[in-house]
Image (cartoon, grey):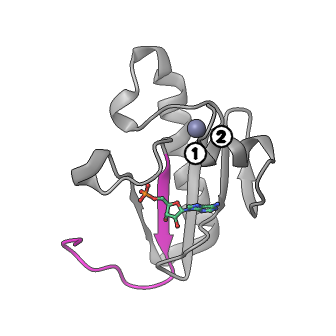
Amino acid sequence: MKDCIFCKLVAGDIPSTIVYENEGIIAFKDINPVAPVHIQVIPKNHIGSLAELTDDNSELASKILLAASEVGKKFCGENGFRVVTNIGNDGGQEIKHLHLHVLGGRKMTWPPG
Ligand code: AMP
Ligand code: ZN
């Protein structure tokens, strides 16, 4: 989608450090990490947020969760990690392209702010 920063990143129009890729998904390092491991897992096709997934995307929905799991296990190992997706204004979503934050490398706090 035009003017979507993550679509531009998928197209290679802006730089990123890709750490995982499969047919429908890429994962790359967050530009402003809030934890020692902070990776974004996104669909290559534009989907606005988790709230925009439908039955038509059920295969992708499963694949993106599995990708987040793979990335978390690979980069955070046995100590665990957190997967977060922000939705809309109250959810704190700044980039309107579905992304799962994979966070780890330190003990997370709860509840989030
Ligand atoms: P959210 O607030 O959930 O929409 O998260 C957006 C995330 O994208 C933030 O953690 C940003 O640091 C990250 N981000 C924004 N631009 C880039 C970029 N060009 N490359 C990597 N991560 C980015
Ligand atoms: Zn997009």
| Residue at (67% x, 33% y) in the render | 24
Q: Which residue is at a point 71% across and 49% down the rendered structure image? A: 9
In this view of the protein, which residue sits in the foreground, 22 or 94?
94
Q: Residue at x 32, y 46 (%)?
A: 87
Residue positioned most to the top: 56
| Numbered mark located on residue 42 in the image | 1
Task: Judge: label 1 CB < 8 Å from ligand 2.
Answer: yes
Between the C-alphas of marks 2 and 1, the distance is 10 Å
Q: Is residue 101 left or right of residue 3?
A: left
**Vertical arrangement, residue 52 with respect to residue 4, above or below:** above
Q: Is mark 2 within 8 Å of ligand 2?
A: yes
What is the three-letter code of the residue carrying label 1?
A: Ile
Say which residue label 2 marks: 7
Q: Position of residue 54 (x, y in %)?
A: 39, 20
Q: Secondary structure at mark 1?
A: strand
Where's residue 41, x and y in %?
Answer: 57, 51
Q: Percent position (x, y) of residue 76?
A: 56, 74
The quadrant of the image that shows the N terminus is top right
- The magenta region covers 99-113
Q: Is residue 100 magenta?
A: yes
Mark 2 near mark 1, Cβ–Cβ under 8 Å? no
12 left or right, relative to 94: right
